[in-house]
Image (cartoon, rainbow, N blue to C red):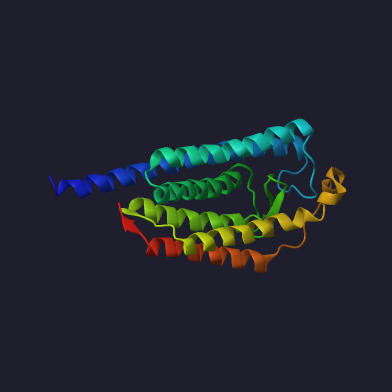
Amino acid sequence: MNSESPDRERHLRTRILVWLTLYAIAMAYVEAALVVHLRQLYYADNLLTIFPLRLLSHTDLVIELVREAATILMLVTVAFLAERGNGRRFAAFVYIFGVWDLGYYSCLKLLIDWPQTWLEWDVLFLLPWPWFGPWITPAAIALLFTGWGAWVLLSEHQPRISWLSASLFVGGAVLGLTAFLLPAADLLPRGEVAFQGYQPEHFAWSLFMLGFVAMTAGLIFALRNKKKE
């Protein structure tokens, strides 16, 4: 009986990971399909670029803002239900987030052959104001999240989030978020009209890379402080 228990636990962890993966991929396709419809509505003349930027109607903007908040809530809810313990629930969240984001860009590539270059700009998020950046930057974070989350979820350990690991991760996330928010920061004082026809040019690569390294270090330290469930 004792010899069967570890195998049963490994099977359970693998099964959970498979279901989380399927859920994230399904979410990715749903979001990609919605984005394709929005591009057909606002960029019917050319689906392969969203710049110069065209503004959503106020109704569509509100719908998008609520949808984005609902998406994050869905990720948190599924992660909470899938695992026990804050460390493994966090791992489940970042894993779903990572697979969802990678799946989203993969679905867009399959549906409309976008993105076409590694450094093509995208509107990444809308809260609290539009995030802009080359699509490869959130994809790199998603790849980190997917790998780290899968490693934790397939192990029998509970990562221990120390002050050091938490500070590194949160600090890195703030730096990365700042890099995404900076391109639009100068537009905010001029209001909505400043975003019409906007074409991003400069991305704070050094800030993003510093944040990415800090997040990676934070996740590594959390693994080094792991404890058995």
Residue extending farthest to the top is 59
Q: Can residue 120 be seen in this view?
A: no
Q: Which picture quadrant has residue 117? A: bottom right
- In screen coordinates, is 50 left or right of 95? right
Q: Residue at x 68, y 37 (%)?
A: 65
38 versus 215 height, above or below: above
Image coordinates of residue 7 in percent, x first then y, are 21, 48
Q: Which residue is drawn at 44% across and 64% down?
A: 220
Quick one: 102 or 216, which is closer to the camera? 216
Image coordinates of residue 125 in percent, x first then y, are 66, 46
Quick one: 208 or 162, which is closer to the camera? 162
Q: Residue at x 60, y 40 (%)?
A: 32
Q: Residue at x 47, y 53 (%)?
A: 146
Quadrant where the image shows the N terminus:
top left
Q: Can residue 212 be seen in this view?
A: yes
Image coordinates of residue 226 in percent, x first then y, are 36, 59
